Amino acid sequence: MQHAAAFVTLMLLLPNGAADSQPLTIDTNFPGGSAKVETIDQERRLIRLSPSPHRDRGWICWWYVHIKGLRPGEILTLDVGPAPWATPDRATFSLDHKTWQQTAPGKREGKRIVYRQQVDGPEAWFAWGPPLVPDDAARMVREAAARLPEAEVFNLATTREGRETPALRLTASAEATPRFGLWIQARQHAWESGSSWVAKGLLDWLTSDDPGATWLRRHADITFIPIMDIDNTQRGAGGKNQKPQDHNRDWTDEPHWNAVAAAQEGLMEIKARGNLDFFIDLHNPGPQDKDAYFYLPPPELLSEAAAKNLARFLAAARQEISGPIPFEGRTIPSGSKYDPKWQAISKNWVATHGGDRVVPVTLETAWNTPGSTTEGYQRVGQQLGRAIVRYLKERAPGTPE
């Protein structure tokens, strides 16, 4: 998405003693880029910004900028607002646009936060959290397919703006008994970039030589979608509560978003084969949440058998998802008291339509902690994979390795 007036350059006379300084420039004209630049103080090396507003495209919380004109080793100051959604305790930055790390903790000043970060290069990218854009998602599934002959890249759906939704399908061994079915998706809310990194960690583990991953590939048909809201992720918009509704309030008989309609169709195809075992929807929660936890369907949607399956999986997840962002047993039902549109939430739709066998959950992984890094998120993904294997092996003891 091209951003009008997104490239901002402020050319000022340099202060005495700073003749070697270059003027700071800010660019958001790239996939996922987003910021409203309020001021640039060249003398103080301070940039004041807030997320770009995108009308009807959801929460105004995501920001992501490319800064040039830095003196290697200098301290850059970013003043960002407003709280709470746009102001993590630690922002994210990269010197090469590949490796992301957290800034030093910011200092809160009213509804804003000030980050001061030493930058050891002439340019850097700063963002609300570690970005993962549609091109990254496409590369992720292509690289996974190149490692596995049983993997197939496909387009889940073409979006309303004409973009593909990269997805991956892994097919179990023809001789596998029993044969399971998993549906794993991330990023129904575009700003929740950490959820795509959890997905990446799960996929990297799944395509590895880990014995649990090898077992799961042999025994499970797996559908994997790293980003559901492609258009808003590309645009740099929040996506949550967008018009007419966000992707995770669109699971109805007539969904507005093409990816949701395609997901519903794919899930019902797996159910028709008789092996829909998991629906896992990956998200990031609020700024006050410091752990991983699950949203669950309300009890009235679950049969006795489905409730037992869910309890067994949660026990497995508690054993495996141990940190740096641990799951310590916290769960929240998403019923009528949670949201008036509770029946249009994805896991609730799956609980209603998917049968007794399926475990439908939303995994929320904290974004506002020191462990909320690319490495920390990916670790949660690996641990989630092991929890799935633990649950399936306990449910079907004696399954051949």
Image: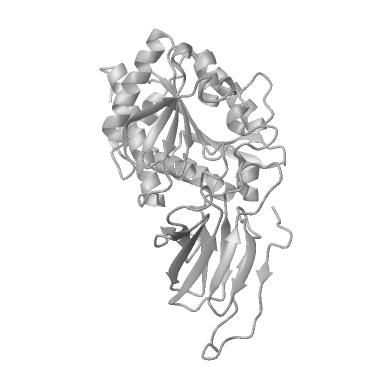
Q: Please indicate whether residue 332 sits to the left or right of residue 387 in the image.
A: right
Work out whether residue 358 or residue 113 is closer to the camera in this orientation and state it: 113
Q: Nearer the viewer, residue 59 or 110?
A: 110
Identify the residue at image location x=55%, y=40%. Answer: 227
Q: Position of residue 89 (x, y in %)?
A: 43, 54
- Residue 215 quadrant: top left
Colour setup of the view: one colour
**Residue at (53% x, 14% y) in the render:** 352
Residue 293 location, x and y as percent?
38, 33
Q: Is residue 314 left or right of residue 134?
A: left
Q: Is residue 255 something that shows in the picture?
A: yes
- Left or right: where 84 falls relative to 28: left
Q: Residue furthest top?
A: 304
Number of dots carrying numbers:
0
In this rendered view, identify the residue nearer to me: 344 or 154: 344
Report if residue 146 is visible in the image. no
Judge from the rendering whether residue 383 lies leftward or rightward of residue 115; answer left or right: left
Give 103 or 170, whichever is nearer the viewer.
103
- Identity of the residue drawn at 61% across and 54% down: 51
Q: What percent of the width, then of the height, locates residue 342? A: 56, 22
Q: Is residue 189 above or below residue 66?
A: above
Q: Please determine whether, in this image, residue 134 is positioned above or below residue 115.
A: above
Q: Position of residue 286 (x, y in %)?
A: 47, 41
Tell me the quarter of the image containing the C terminus: top left
Who's the residue at 52% across and 49% down the image? 132
